[in-house]
Image (cartoon, grey):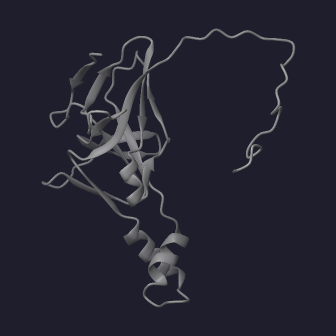
Amino acid sequence: MLVDCFQQHPKAILPVYATENAACFDLHAAAFNSITERGIGEEIQYSTNGLVTYQDAIVVDTGLVFMVPAGYGLFIFSRSGQIKEQVTLANCVGVVDPDYRGTVKVVLRRNVTHSVVYDSVMASIGYSVVTQPLADELSSAINMHSVRVGDRVAQACLLPVPRCEFRAVSSVTSTARGTGGFGSTGVR
């Protein structure tokens, strides 16, 4: 399937599949934006080597506009290797509709908690009790993560999305599971 992409940012990289049988193609960082109270802010000026370091979250602009075909959606996921750095997409899965014509952006978030910092750092250096200011300072330093222009920051795939119609009914059919919700089927 041929999908048209417009490289809106000069550092945008067309998507590529990492292997011949990869289900998703990789998306690369072209620019970075700040997060403001009202949403996505201005482009962040990064160092000459294209490096940006952040603590909590950062908006990564791929610089690409995808012309998603009608009847499809572009679904964006975290890359499996990001778990090593405890980085995920802030919204878990991104969805790009066929009528969207802006650049595709992803929000990367660090998922390191104070307890992880305490367990992995404080115990390893021999502290059994730590003051809160020291814990906060160490947590801030450890939570930093860096991304460079050109880094693979997410993966995506095009999937068919059927258009559904909905109708109201007067009753619900019964099933063996019934109303059993979270965890109702067990773990084994």
In the rendered image, residue 112, in percent from the top left (x then y), is placed at: 48, 63
- Is 163 located above or below residue 31 in the figure? above
Name the side, left or right, on which 21 lies relative to 10: right
- Is 63 located above or below residue 137 in the figure? above
Q: Residue furthest front?
A: 188
Number of numbered labels in the structure image? 0
Q: Quadrant of residue 105?
A: top left
**Quadrant of the snapshot with the N terminus:** top left
Name the side, left or right, on which 124 lies relative to 103: right
In front of the other: 86 or 146: 86
Residue at the location (78% across, 11% down)? 168
In front of the other: 28 or 175: 175
In the rendered image, residue 147, in percent from the top left (x then y), is placed at: 27, 53
Q: Quadrant of residue 3?
A: top left
Residue at the location (85% across, 23% down)? 174
Name the side, left or right, on which 61 lies relative to 134: left
In the rendered image, residue 177, in percent from the top left (x then y), is placed at: 80, 33
In the rendered image, residue 73, in percent from the top left (x then y), is placed at: 44, 21
Q: Quadrant of residue 17?
A: top left
In front of the other: 131 or 181: 181
- Is 150 located above or below residue 56 in the figure? above
Residue at the location (35% across, 38% down)? 155
Q: Residue furthest left?
A: 48
